[in-house]
Image: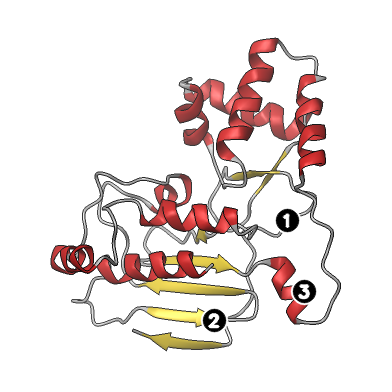
Amino acid sequence: MIIALEELLANAIVHNNYENGKPIQIYVSEKQINIVNYNKPLPPIRISDLNERTFFNERDTENPEIRDMFKALGIIESFGTGIGEAKRSMRENGSPDLFYKTFDVNDNVTSVVIPVNEEYYEIKNGSKPKKKVWIETETKDFKQKILDSGYTNKIKQNVLKLYEKIGTEVFGNSRVVEILGCSEVTATSYLKRMEDELKIIVPVEGMGKGKYKFWKGGNNAGKESTGLYMRNI
């Protein structure tokens, strides 16, 4: 989680609009950290891209001077990779995926949530850690469920490919198109199969329409708790 926090704080500073007079805000609670910029990403990047992608080679910044300074200081290793590195570190830590909140189209805000590792939270609060569901044995059972379905071999292999490529990330139609190289209509049909028939994906709340995660035995992705205090930087 520390790596994710460092990457996303650097990202917030580099992409903040300092002309609007609104500071970056950090809300901290027991179960999450929320970093807020009061400006949207510069086009062509959208909030949905921040949720679905891990690399942004075409992304412009509000502050190229700060970006270049951070690069020279080693705070940034390479351009366009910070969000992807943050997502990777959360997965490797066994934490829930970070996510960017979806607001009304007229709301000029970028808000990323970093959830606390659930097992750590339970240990810290003296409760018995829940059994981890996403373990190797159940992953094998999950894959077997796909292989035992009545679909063609091509469809089975494509569903397995989606699972292996996406893992615990939040995804939507565009991610399926990217991985399978198919049309949007075909991607939609895969989402429908996985949700309604195989029942291996579930909708994610609070991240816009048509966002899903592979089912992990009950997940509160997209839900958040209220911040307890706030810091400005």
Quarter location, residue 215: top right
User: Could you tell me residue 129's position as x and y percent?
Assistant: 82, 68
Whether residue 198 is visible here, answered yes or no, is yes
Residue placed most toward the observer, 173 or 95: 95
Q: Please state which of the two labelled residues, at mark 1 or mark 3, is closer to the viewer.
A: 3
Count neighbours of disc 2 (C-alpha within 10 A) and say few if under 14, some if 14 to 19, many if 20 or more.
some
| Badge 2 or badge 3: first in the primary sequence | 2
Residue at (86% x, 72% y) in the render: 128
The mark nearer the N terminus, 1 or 3, is: 3
Which residue does the image show at 54% across and 60% down from the upper left? 98
Task: Give the quarter of the figure containing the N terminus.
Answer: bottom right
Q: Which residue is mark 3?
A: 122
Pointer 2 residue: 28
Q: Which residue is mark 1?
A: 219
For the residue marked with disc 1, what is the amino acid? Asn
Q: Secondary structure at mark 2?
A: strand
Judging from the image, the colouring scheme is: secondary structure
Task: Find residue 125 and report its image quarter.
Answer: bottom right
Kind of residue at disc 3: Glu
- The quarter of the picture where residue 130 lies is bottom right
